[in-house]
């Protein structure tokens, strides 16, 4: 019983937006997520319809749970129902639950409607839009019920804190004015810990405590104090006490403060008792005269004592108690319990309640026996006519039974009817009883027909699927007669007399012709019908003749045309399949494939191979050595430099790569795969050559494809391929316009004997080119030849202001750009030039970069875009340093290592 009123079990009511998020994400998680437009439309519809249905079901379940878990006001005990009405307002509560129910119905309706509409959607997009609309409408409904959700959650929280009062168990209720000591009493007799304070309305809600008495469990309810005022004026706190008093079958302990410390006189307290007395009807009531430790009952003035005596005379026991000294507390408790127990036992005996479930229904059935009001006999009145008829009937029946011999019963109906009128006919039942097994039910024997012979005629009711009754015209006879008459009249008038003179020649001819025409017509109709039947169903436009597929003469398959010889064809097929294997594997890869790329280190990537060299590193080294040894006499060298400098922009483009054959590539993936395969093959044969070739091929191809204007060339791509490509290498030669050439040209135009620092010089090509004209010092981290001074570029082994020109040609690497520029500034004289050449793609923002350098103590002298790929800057050192580490001196990481 108690579990029924355990409101703590109600699940938390989520707020509307929270629920919306939860259900939508659940729908997303629990339904399939991948759909493609090439799926059959049925599948797409099912995909989206499933989402709608899932959301509907989730919401339906959630709302149903809420509706079911919250107690129904009609079903719970009146005490709880009233209490809830006081606390939460019955109407509000019902409306909130009703709205949940309405929302549930509406959501079901929306889902049904959209699932139906989904049948008409003809594309993925439409299906998706319908799903979106449906989901949107459903969750919007939730949002509209926001306030109901909030209210129900508040109710739930409050309900869960209500004391679990069992309305059917043994109960003691404490009531009375505030501050009289009710809470103190409950604290004394039970283990409850209700707050006790010396001011009124300390207790604002119902509290429950339990005690054991006579091996039984009792619940004690402490109520908030009640004031003596009309019911309408009572507030929610007081009403809780009133509800408990009104609905719980309990022993009432009306607590009074005899000391009048609660600011209420004995009279006032007794007045309250009288005013709420109707609530105590049929309940044992006791008065607890509390606080006798302060003032004893005997100390009361005579008039007050008389009032109490008066009550006692009425049969209401008064027990003097003191919760402070515990005096009388137990005796009050015991008396209250005893009285309630006695009452309950009595009620039980009266009700003769038997616990057996089977008998429980019988216990409730009550048969009333009317008691005769006097001795007079009141016989029922039978009209004399009816009495006579009955008597006659009885007589007749007796006669029949007398006359009837067993054998005569066979002819029963006829025999009896002889001396019986129509109304006296024997019942079929009687006949059946008399004849027993010989009886045959005959419903037709009493038919009243004009001609009795027709009695057993079989009348078809249904003929050829038609109900004959439908065709029976009640006036058919009259109509027939009128028709006959009309016919007669027509005959008399000579309607049917032939006007044709059959003997006439012309008529005969005409007749013969007409006959021919008719025959011909008949034949034509027949032919037409036959034709139509063959063609298909007659008269239907829908079932027209099926169109036959035209069979075109197709040429033989292409492979057969190409290789008429079967053996050769098979061989080619085999080769093709083998060649395509890799491509197919590649092509099957999708974006979503978890493909682990083949990230082999280089030695594994291009190591072992069939023919040719096996050591690509050694080969590279050999090549460098060869080049070094090739560096001959100064004259030769000069010529080489001149030649190098003359190399124009488009020299790079003029490569002599083989024109690639155009192949019918099906798609990009295959193309790429083929390219990769080709590269691998080449690398395997000759790594170095292949790298160079590939790079140059790239350049050439791009140039050819887009023409001279749109030529696209990415240094990174080129340089990435060959990490260790040097300026002399084929790759660098193909650069449209190497910034180094520009710088050399620029240096050549400068006056002689300038002090030039080439920072990050690589192989010190500048020194090599213009080493005689200027005083050039080349610095780099690694000294590849004797011209290079090995050092850290942020710590140059040079004095302050010793340089006229500092060059960074594609050498601003690393993250400490500030240190490089700072160091360059240090070694430059005032007015000295800082020349920077860098790949355009490395700049995050060119403007910021320039500003940053100028702030570090330079002024911009020149800025130039050298082809699409390089930027060339010229800064002049000034005295003033605006900022030591300005923002913006940033370059993206470079993909090449040496210039
Ligand atoms: N001297 C004395 N004081 C008592 C006795 N019983 C209660 N009090 C005091 O009376 C004051 C009120 O006691 P409560 O038990 O809070 O009274 P209440 O009827 O529950 O009051 P509300 O909850 O406000 O309705 C407290 O200060 C108690 O200490 C008693 O028997 N003797
Ligand atoms: Mg109290």
Image: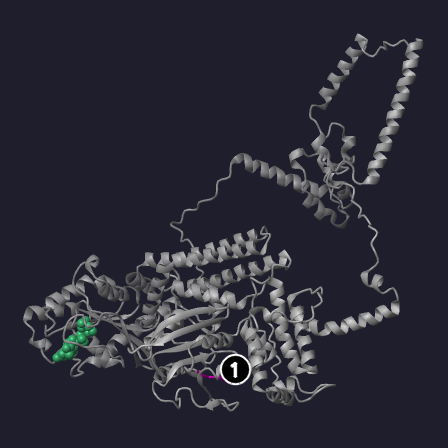
Residue range (magenta): 758-768
- Quadrant where the N terminus sits is bottom left
How did the renderer colour the structure? one colour
Image point 64% across, 35% down: which residue? Answer: 423
Foreground pick, 405 / 856: 856
Residue to which mark 1 is pinned: 898
Q: Is residue 46 left or right of residue 745?
A: right
Compared to residue 578, the image places residue 457 above or below, namely: above
Badge 1 residue CB within 8 Å of ligand 2: no
Image point 72% across, 37% down: which residue? Answer: 416
Compared to residue 739, the image places residue 120 above or below, namely: above
Mark 1 nearby-residue class (10 Å; few <14, some 14–19, many ≥20)? some
Foreground pick, 388 / 805: 805
Q: Quadrant of residue 504?
A: top right
Q: Position of residue 466 (x, y in %)?
A: 73, 36
Foreground pick, 496 / 556: 556
In reply to whether residue 765 is colored magenta, the answer given is yes
Foreground pick, 602 / 611: 611
Query: Can residue 822 be seen?
Result: yes
Q: Where is residue 32 in the image (x, y as percent from the top left)?
A: 57, 66
Q: Is residue 690 left or right of residue 319?
A: right
Secondary structure state at the residue bearing disc 1: loop
Q: Where is residue 290 in the image (x, y as percent from the top left)?
A: 15, 76
Query: Can residue 317 be seen?
Result: no
Furthest toward the left, the residue is 301
In reply to whether residue 717 is colored magenta, the answer given is no
Total marks shown come to 1
Q: Dividing the image into four equal quarters, which quarter contains ligand 1? A: bottom left
Q: In which quarter of the image is residue 409?
A: top right
Q: Position of residue 651 (x, y in %)?
A: 59, 71
Q: Quadrant of residue 205?
A: bottom left
């Amino acid at each position: 019983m108690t579990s029924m009123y355990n409101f703590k079990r109600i699940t938390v009511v989520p707020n509307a937006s929270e629920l919306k998020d939860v259900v939508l994400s659940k729908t997303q998680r629990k339904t399939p997520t991948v759909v493609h437009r090439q799926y059959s439309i049925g599948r797409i519809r099912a995909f989206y319809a499933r989402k709608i249905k899932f959301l509907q079901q989730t919401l339906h379940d959630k709302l149903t749970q809420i509706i079911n878990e919250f107690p129904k006001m009609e079903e719970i005990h009146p005490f709880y129902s009233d209490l809830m009405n006081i606390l939460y307002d019955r109407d509000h509560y019902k409306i909130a639950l009703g709205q949940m129910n309405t929302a549930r119905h509406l959501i079901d309706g929306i889902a049904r409607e959209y699932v139906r509409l989904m049948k008409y959607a003809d594309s993925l997009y439409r299906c998706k839009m319908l799903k979106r609309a449906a989901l949107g409408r459903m969750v919007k409904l939730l949002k509209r019920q926001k306030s109901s959700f909030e209210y129900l959650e508040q109710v739930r929280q409050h309900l869960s804190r209500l004391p679990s009062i069992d309305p059917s168990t043994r109960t003691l209720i404490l009531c009375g004015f505030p501050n009289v000591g009710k809470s103190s009493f409950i604290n004394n007799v039970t283990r409850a810990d209700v707050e006790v304070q010396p001011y009124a309305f300390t207790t604002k809600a119902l509290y429950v405590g339990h005690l054991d008495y006579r091996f039984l469990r009792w619940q004690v309810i402490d109520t908030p104090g009640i004031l003596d005022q009309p019911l309408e004026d009572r507030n929610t706190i007081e009403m809780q006490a009133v509800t408990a008093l009104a609905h719980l079958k309990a022993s009432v302990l009306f607590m009074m403060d005899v000391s009048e410390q609660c600011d209420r006189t004995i009279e006032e307290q007794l007045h309250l008792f009288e005013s709420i007395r109707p609530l105590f009807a049929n309940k044992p009531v006791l008065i607890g005269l509390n606080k006798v430790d302060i003032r004893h009952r005997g100390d009361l003035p005579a008039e007050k004592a008389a009032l109490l005596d008066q009550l006692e005379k009425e049969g209401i026991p008064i027990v003097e108690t003191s919760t402070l000294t515990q005096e009388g507390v137990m005796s009050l408790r015991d008396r209250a319990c005893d009285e309630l127990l006695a009452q309950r036992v009595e009620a039980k005996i009266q009700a003769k309640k038997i616990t057996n479930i089977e008998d429980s229904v019988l216990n409730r059935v009550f048969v009333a026996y009317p008691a005769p009001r006097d001795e007079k006999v009141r016989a029922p009145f039978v009209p004399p006519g009816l009495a006579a008829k009955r008597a006659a009937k009885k007589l007749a029946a007796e006669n029949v039974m007398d006359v009837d011999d067993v054998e005569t019963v066979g002819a029963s109906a006829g025999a009896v009817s002889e001396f019986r009128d129509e109304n006296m006919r024997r019942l079929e039942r009687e006949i059946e009883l008399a004849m027993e097994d010989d009886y045959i039910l005959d419903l037709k024997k009493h038919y009243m027909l004009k001609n009795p012979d027709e009695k057993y005629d079989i009348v078809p009711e249904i003929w050829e699927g038609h109900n004959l009754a439908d065709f029976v015209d009640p006036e058919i006879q009259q109509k027939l007669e009128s028709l006959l008459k009309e016919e007669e009249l027509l005959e008399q008038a000579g309607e049917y007399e032939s006007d044709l003179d059959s003997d006439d020649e012309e008529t005969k001819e005409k007749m013969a012709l007409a006959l021919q025409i008719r025959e011909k017509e008949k034949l034509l109709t027949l032919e037409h019908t036959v034709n139509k039947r063959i063609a298909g169903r007659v008269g239907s436009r829908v079932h027209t003749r099926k169109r036959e597929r035209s069979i075109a003469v197709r040429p033989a398959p292409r492979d057969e045309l190409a290789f008429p010889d079967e053996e050769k064809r098979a061989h080619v097929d085999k080769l093709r399949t083998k060649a395509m294997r890799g491509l197919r594997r590649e092509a099957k890869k999708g974006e979503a494939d978890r493909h682990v790329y083949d990230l082999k280190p280089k030695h594994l990537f291009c190591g072992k191979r069939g023919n040719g060299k096996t050591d690509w590193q050694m080969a590279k080294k050999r090549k460098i050595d060869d080049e070094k040894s090739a560096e001959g006499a100064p004259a030769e060298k000069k010529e080489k430099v001149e030649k190098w400098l003359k190399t124009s922009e488009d020299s790079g483009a003029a490569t002599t790569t083989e024109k690639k054959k155009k192949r019918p590539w099906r798609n990009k993936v295959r193309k790429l795969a083929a390219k990769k395969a080709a590269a691998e093959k080449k690398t395997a044969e000759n790594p170095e050559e292949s790298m160079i070739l590939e790079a140059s091929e790239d350049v050439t191809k791009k140039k050819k494809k887009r023409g001279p204007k749109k030529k696209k060339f990415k240094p990174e791509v080129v340089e990435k391929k060959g990490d260790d490509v040097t300026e002399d290498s084929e790759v660098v030669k193909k650069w449209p316009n190497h910034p180094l050439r520009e710088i050399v040209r620029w240096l050549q135009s400068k006056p002689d004997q300038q002090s030039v620092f080439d920072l990050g010089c690589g192989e010190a090509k500048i020194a090599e080119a213009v080493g005689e004209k200027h005083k050039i010092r080349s610095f780099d981290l690694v000294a590849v030849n004797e011209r290079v001074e090995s050092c850290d570029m942020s710590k140059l082994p040079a004095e302050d202001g010793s340089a006229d020109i500092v060059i960074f040609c594609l050498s601003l690497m690393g993250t400490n750009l500030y240190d490089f520029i700072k160091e360059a500034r240090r070694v430059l004289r005032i007015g000295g030039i800082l020349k920077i050449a860098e790949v355009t793609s490395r700049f995050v923002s060119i403007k910021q970069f320039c500003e940053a350098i100028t702030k570090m103590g330079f002024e911009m002298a020149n800025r130039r875009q050298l082809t699409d790929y390089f930027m060339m800057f010229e800064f002049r050192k000034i005295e003033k340093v605006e900022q030591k580490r300005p923002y913006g001196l940033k370059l993206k990481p470079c993909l090449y290592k040496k210039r």
